[in-house]
Amino acid sequence: MATQTRKRNQGATLIYMAKAAVLEPFRAAKAAAAETYLQPRRPTLFRAMRAMPNPAPDSNVMGVGIGEKITKGRHTGILAVKLLVRRKYDRGQISSSELLPAVINGLPTDVEQVGTFRRLEAALAPVPMPNPKARMRPARPGCSVGFRDPNDAFRMAGTFGALVKRGETQFILSNNHVLADENRLPVGSPIFQPGLLDGGQIPTDQIAALSDFVALMPGAPNQVDCAIAEVAKKLASRDILFIGSPTGKEKAKRDMIVHKFGRTTSYTVGRVTSIDTDVSVEYETGVFTFNNQMIIQGINQEPFSDAGDSGSAIVSRDSQRVVGLLFAGSPTHTIANHIDDVLTALNVTLA
């Protein structure tokens, strides 16, 4: 998606000077853009959203955030309102009515191609050691978990993100769509390790029971995609595969280097490129809008996540503290909830 050009970018701010007070006008500009381009959409079946992208902003814009302006692959050091699009068009390919603005509220914009954000559903893929699809007792964060479809129409698997607790009771933490099937399962539904897609057996491999989830809301902004399942203490560990025990939690920061271990792509390293992005994400039951999300991109142009990694804990590589909960993405960008929002919504703490 091309942008309208001006001779000078007014309101440009160097990213290393972007203190809290300086960020406020960018947040206001981001909110204005999100209101324009990310209006809640009527729930639509997943298959119906697979149409080819078109340059109309209400169809092409997938997210709005705050990050560094990148020009012809070069980091400029300038803070900008980021307009994330399915496809970035050349100026000659689109009409003037389809141009995105070069400036919002006097602040520069940057258009970035991200593809289509979709929840990361289960998929088969080779995984290096340690094998997250193996049966583990105790189960460890990073391994395969999942629910049973009541009609046995399909088998699925996602990722056990972290061990959390409420009082003395311990729970597996993952996404709503990994443990509660996008609001459709009742509390008490069995959770298996490994997930049934990865060879889990219904008679022997139930490890937990769905306890609570934050409902995904159509037609309104969401903050989190999360759920918990109660697990006996001896059946789960807090040690993330390959990474080890988290040392607590902290807030994510732009340019923070993070890592995760997931059911599909195993161990990967990435960089946080935004901590304040609003996105539209395709689910089986519709398209949902999420506000103030974290965006991560893999290091050295390697993908940070893939289908089946949903539920993985995002951990600061420097401090070993949890910063987010992975739930969606595209081939180039990963989306995560902020961990404080997740823990607060579920009224739990890290175990």
Image: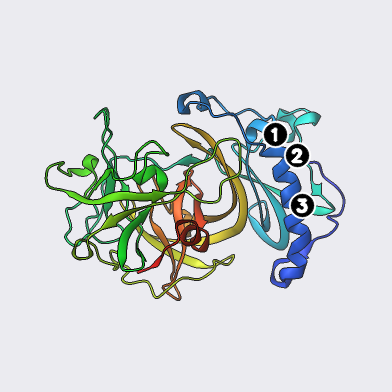
Q: Nearer the viewer, residue 144 or 257?
A: 144
Mark 3 or mark 1, earlier in chain? 3
Residue mark closest to the camera, 3 vs 1 = 3
Mark 1 closeness class: few <14, some 14–19, many ≥20 residues within 10 Å: some
Say above or below: 348 vs 121. below
Residue where numbered disc 2 is placed: 100
Contact check, label 3 and label 1, Cβ < 8 Å: no
Q: Is residue 18 visible?
A: no
Q: CA distance from mark 3 to mark 2?
A: 14 Å
Q: Which residue is mark 1?
A: 57
Amino acid residing under circle 2 = Leu
The reply, left or right, for residue 188 in relation to residue 45 is left
Q: Position of residue 329 (x, y in %)?
A: 48, 46
Residue 38 position within the rendered picture, expressed as x and y whole percent measured from the top left: 66, 39
The numbered disc on residue 29 is 3
Q: Quadrant of the C terminus?
A: bottom left
Give the residue type that dot 3 points to.
Ala
For the residue carrying disc 2, how many other residues have a C-alpha within 10 Å: few (<14), some (14-19), or many (20+)?
Answer: many
Query: Of helix, strand and loop, which one carries label 1?
Result: helix
Label 3, residues with CA under 10 Å away: few <14, some 14-19, many ≥20:
many
Q: CA distance from mark 3 to mark 1?
A: 17 Å
Q: Which of pointers 3 and 2 indicates the residue nearer the eye?
A: 3
Q: Residue at x 59, y 59 (%)?
A: 275
Residue at 80% in and 61% down = 12
Q: Position of residue 83 (x, y in %)?
A: 67, 46
Amino acid at pointer 1: Pro
| Residue 265 visible, this orientation | yes
> Do the residues under discs 1 and 2 have CB atoms within 8 angstroms?
yes
Q: Are marks 3 and 2 in contact (CB under 8 Å)?
A: no
Q: Nearer the viewer, residue 152 or 307?
A: 152
